[in-house]
Amino acid sequence: MPDSPRRIVIIGATSSIAEHCARLWAAPGVTLTLVGRDAGRLERVAADLRVRSPGAEVDTRSGDLLDARAIRTLVDAIVAQGMPDRVLIAHGVLPDQQACQRDLGAAFDALQVNALSPVLFAEAFAGHMEHSGGVITLIGSVAGDRGRRSNYVYGAAKGLVTRYAQGLQHRLAGSGSRCC
């Protein structure tokens, strides 16, 4: 991987953390691919980045971040444009714990968006990047450190992401790519 990444993919690019990372990384010669569910919000973030860093190339892609086939198709299309040096997986939502307790559908949705989707994106990119020298970063949460009454569904999801990232780190060890 080059010292300074040239191709960066941000999943969940409309989150505050992701948007601030994009601002830090946008520079002449850098290609940013912003991915999210809301095309309008993505385009607003992209327009802001283009003004802040006119030398950066900013692309947006919207789609279903919860469907495994759609994730595979999206990742394959992104990689076909050029192998990323860095992938930031930053999407998620803090659900209403009480709603998750009352409604299994709400609990399922919270687990899907906060655990399964980030893991599937990481796995899809890892398959392409395993020997390319790139970095895959998953954003977790301290909520995943231990179960808390106030947010245990969210915490369980983020705990899954943490354990997955640990396993992916071991898989990629010695390959030239990293997960953090």
Image (spheres, rainbow, N blue to C red):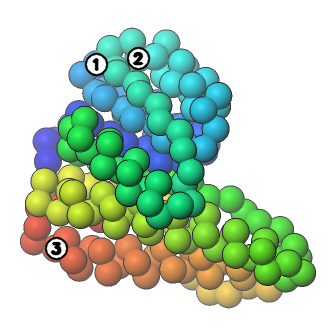
- Give the class, few, some or many, for how many residues have Cα within 10 Å of label 1's Cα (few <14, many ≥20): few
Image location (x, y in percent) of residue 9: 37, 42
Q: Going 30% across and 74% down the picture, which residue do you hit? A: 168
Q: Which is nearer the N-term, disc 3 or disc 2? A: 2
Which badge, 1 or 3, comes first in the chain's sequence?
1
Q: Position of residue 152 (x, y in %)?
A: 72, 82
Residue 117: which numbered mark, if any?
none
Residue 131, position as x, y percentages in the image = 11, 60
Left or right for 120, reference 48: left
Quarter of the figure with residue 104: bottom right
Indicate whether 43 appears above or below 132.
above
Amino acid type, callout 1: Pro
Between residues 159 and 82, which one lies in front from this camera angle? Answer: 82
Report which residue position mark 3 lands on. Answer: 173
Image quarter hosting the C terminus: bottom left
Quadrant in which residue 66 is drawn: bottom right
Residue at (87% x, 73% y) in the render: 99
Q: Amino acid at mark 2?
A: Ser
Which numbered circle lies on residue 53?
A: 2
Query: Tags 2 and 1 in contact by the CB under 8 Å rule?
Result: yes
Q: Is residue 173 left or right of residue 34?
A: left
Q: Residue at x 24, y 64 (%)?
A: 127
Q: Are marks 1 and 3 in contact (CB under 8 Å)?
A: no
